């Protein structure tokens, strides 16, 4: 077990890595739209939740659950058995997801209102195969309070992904590829970034030797991952669920023609801005999470209650200011980033979701800190 000071350093590094990764994810949408246009952003962003939801499970939710299972295991060999059991369980689930998505891609594309999106959905499904290794490797480090590998791999994964994505986008535009082909290139870059992260984590994880896994262990781990794991994941993906609902509704409700798809692309300009605002508003409150968890684990109820109240108060105050500020600067921001003022009124209205979404993120984080993952999941529904 690492010293408390090193653990605290790891927590700070992990938090900074999360903020930096989210900033990278926000920043690349601007050149993407500038290069591919609003229709190109539509083709990319409409299927984005299908990639981001599973990626977030492998980056945040599943590693946390695997780490908790690993901490509860007694002895080095038992910990290894739990980790390998988690890998096999997640790999089985990933294969089922890939096969299901591959077969149902035309059906999903039809429900999205655009059959041209089916090949992109199939490319996205291949990234699901990377999730088990990423989740288990990150969880193995978090189980021993070493957050550095997760933090470093997360940042490098996003840097590689965005670099490959933008290079592929420029090459595709240079050779006259359409928006749908460009989106397939973009999601192919996700595969490259994920492989790089697995390589980095594998070089760091020298202790993960192969051990046999008992059927009882596999069943136990699978049950926990399907219950607690997906509860944690479901509760932590609020803004992505909003985008998923939009993907199935906006284009269809607007008639499904080219103008509707361009309109959806214009509307999608707003989500990166809202996500970045949420990241900013929740950052100060999130700083209290490590102390909150420690107080709760130690049974200090008054300190836990005080920490929860403080986190919600800080988030409420900052979120209100950030929401008003984002609404106020949306017109010049829209022109400066996306080259014209199209959809500014809609983006101003979308900005109002920053306040409620920030409180939702803070509330879900508080519930997860005090082991109320299922309550958080019900709240997200």
Image (cartoon, rainbow, N blue to C red):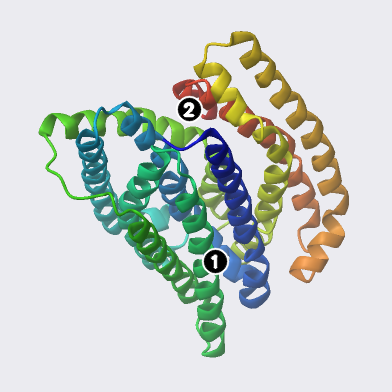
Q: Is residue 172 above or below residue 59?
A: below
Image spot of residue 338 (x, y percent): 74, 68
Q: Nearer the viewer, residue 101 or 194?
A: 194
How many labels sit on residues? Answer: 2
Q: Image quadrant for the N terminus?
A: top left
Q: Is residue 165 above or below residue 318?
A: below
- Quadrant of the rendered image containing residue 339: bottom right
Image spot of residue 228 (x, y percent): 37, 28
Q: Going by the image, does 238 lie left or right of 203? A: right
Please state which of the two labelled residues, at mark 2 or mark 1, is closer to the viewer.
Answer: 1
Q: Which mark is residue 377?
A: 2
Residue at 76% across / 40% down in the picture? 352
Q: Of callouts 2 and 1, which one flags the residue occurring earlier in the amino acid sequence?
A: 1
Q: Sort mark 2 into few (<14), some (14-19) or many (20+) by Cα contacts within 10 Å.
A: many
Residue corresponding to mark 1? 159
Q: Secondary structure at mark 2?
A: helix
Residue at 37% across / 67% down in the picture? 119
Image spot of residue 299 (x, y percent): 53, 11
Residue at 57% across / 82% down in the picture? 170
Q: Nearer the viewer, residue 163 or 68?
A: 68
Q: Secondary structure at mark 1?
A: helix
Residue at 66% across / 52% down in the picture? 271
Q: Nearer the viewer, residue 315 or 123?
A: 315
Asked if disc 2 and disc 1 are in contact, CB closer than 8 Å, the reply is no
Residue at mark 2 to residue at mark 1: CA–CA distance: 31 Å
Image spot of residue 57 (x, y percent): 42, 44
Q: Going by the image, does 117 lie left or right of 328? A: left
């Amino acid at each position: 077990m690492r010293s408390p000071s090193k653990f605290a350093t790891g927590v700070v590094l992990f938090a900074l890595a999360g903020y930096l990764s989210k900033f990278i994810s926000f920043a690349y949408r601007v050149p993407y739209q500038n290069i591919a246009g609003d229709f190109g952003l539509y083709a990319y962003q409409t299927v984005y939740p299908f990639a981001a939801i599973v990626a977030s499970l492998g980056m945040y939710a599943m590693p946390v659950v695997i780490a908790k299972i690993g901490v509860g295991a007694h002895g080095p060999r038992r910990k290894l058995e739990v980790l390998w059991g988690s890998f096999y369980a997640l790999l089985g689930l990933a294969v089922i997801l890939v096969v299901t998505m591959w077969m149902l891609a035309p059906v999903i594309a039809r429900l999205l209102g655009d059959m041209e999106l089916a090949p992109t959905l199939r490319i996205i499904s291949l990234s699901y195969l990377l999730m088990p290794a990423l989740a288990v490797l990150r969880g193995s480090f978090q189980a021993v309070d070493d957050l550095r590998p997760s933090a470093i791999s997360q940042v490098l994964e996003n840097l590689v992904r965005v670099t490959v994505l933008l290079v592929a986008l420029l090459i595709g535009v240079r050779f006259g590829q359409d928006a749908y082909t460009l989106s397939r290139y973009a999601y192919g870059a996700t595969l490259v970034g994920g492989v790089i992260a697995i390589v980095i984590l594998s070089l760091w994880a020298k202790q993960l030797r192969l051990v046999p896994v008992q059927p009882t262990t596999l069943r136990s781990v699978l049950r926990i991952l399907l219950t607690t794991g997906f509860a944690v994941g479901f509760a932590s993906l609020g803004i992505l669920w909003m985008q998923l609902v939009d993907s199935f509704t906006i284009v269809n409700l607007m008639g499904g023609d080219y103008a509707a798809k361009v309109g959806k692309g214009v509307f999608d300009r707003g989500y990166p801005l809202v996500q970045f605002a949420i990241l900013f508003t929740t950052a100060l409150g999130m700083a209290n999470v490590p102390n909150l968890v420690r107080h709760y684990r130690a049974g200090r109820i008054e300190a836990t209650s005080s920490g929860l109240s403080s986190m919600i108060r800080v988030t409420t105050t900052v979120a209100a200011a950030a929401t008003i500020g984002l609404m106020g600067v949306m017109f010049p921001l829209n022109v400066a980033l996306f080259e014209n003022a199209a959809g500014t009124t809609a983006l101003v209205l979308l900005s109002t979701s920053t306040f409620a979404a920030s409180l939702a993120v803070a509330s879900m984080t508080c519930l997860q800190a005090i082991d109320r993952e299922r309550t958080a999941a019900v709240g997200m529904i």
